[in-house]
Image (cartoon, grey):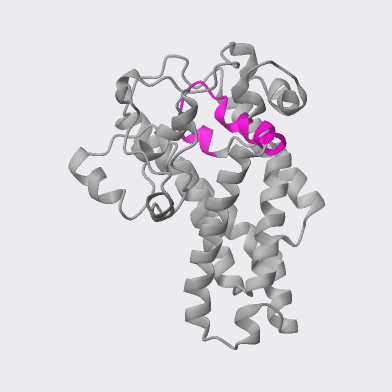
Amino acid sequence: MVPTAEIAARIGASFVVFAALVVWELALPRRSLKLGRTPRWPHNLGLLLVDIALVRLLVPTAAVGVAVIAAQRGFGLFNVLSAPGWLAAVLGFVVLDFAIYLQHAIFHHVPALWRLHRVHHADLELDVSTGVRFHPLEILLSLLIKMTVVAVIGVPAVAVLIFEIVLNATSMFNHANVAIPPGVERWLRLLVVTPQMHEVHHSVVRAETDSNFGFNLPWWDRLLGTYRAEPAAGEAGMTIGLPQFRDKRELRIDRLLMQPFRRDGSRQTDR
């Protein structure tokens, strides 16, 4: 697949999912937002634009390009073993998802990496825009990790593209402020990470922040003991964000970009 088609597919899918979730949030919100969109969205979406520009400038081939090169040159586990395309695609998707789970957990427990990732956690409310709010350096590191996994495993390009589209979609979905009937949600979280499952991860309580690391598949948290069904204070009593970034000024894009390089005395910051 040529890079132009890849970019068009990813942008098109992301736009459709984002728009659908915005409509869902407006029609059936799960919680009322105190701050709302006005003080947050320009900066969250501005950070997304910085991420996109930086990635396309510094890593134009991205993970799909690595998959194409690996297939052409015959390196990577699945290519060496000549695994059937469908099997390589399915297993490749699962391996990539597990890699993202591990990456997420590591970013929480390595102090230097947490300083990048905490930009995402410092949002004071959760909605679809939080799902695209990541520091550019974290995005670049995540992309390099995915490229490495793709090269080592030999994940087919089509599986990489599908994974990237699904990952973007689920990141927006599991941060969205959308209401799902409890009976449906209880079964849905067995198949995919739901907003109710993921919101525990954005609790101000550190033990809850360090749980529910999955983005796509919810199984890794259950298998590896990092799953929490709900916050201790309940959904209504849970405080979202980080204790050291409660000032509304911290929502500005300039503060978000510089946040990893600023010092403070919080234990949660230094990890």
Q: Is residue 167 left or right of residue 28?
A: right
Quadrant that contains the C terminus: top right
Residue at 28% of width from left, 50% of height from top? 188
> Is residue 113 covered in magenta?
yes
Q: Is residue 82 left or right of residue 235?
A: right
Residue at 45% of width from left, 26% of height from top? 203
From the top left corner, tell me how far across and down residue 157 is, in percent.
Answer: 61, 72
**Count of numbered circles in the view:** 0
From the top left corner, tell me how far across and down residue 124 is, in percent.
Answer: 51, 20
Q: Residue furthest left?
A: 183
From the top left corner, tell me how far across and down residue 10 is, in percent.
Answer: 58, 56
Residue at 71% of width from left, 68% of height from top? 65
Q: Nearer the viewer, residue 28 or 83?
A: 83
Determine whether 167 is above or below 129 in the image: below
Q: Residue furthest right?
A: 58
Quadrant that contains the N terminus: bottom right
Quarter-of-image position of residue 255: top right
User: Residue 54, can we see it?
Assistant: yes
Q: Is residue 238 left or right of residue 164?
A: left
Q: Majority secondary structure of the magenta segment?
A: helix
> Is residue 81 covered in magenta?
no
Magenta extent: 111-131
Q: Nearer the viewer, residue 187 or 224?
A: 224
Quarter-of-image position of residue 239: top left
Quarter-of-image position of residue 135: top right
Q: Is residue 246 left or right of residue 145?
A: left
From the top left corner, tell me how far across and down residue 29 is, in percent.
Answer: 32, 29
User: Residue 1, can we see it?
Assistant: no
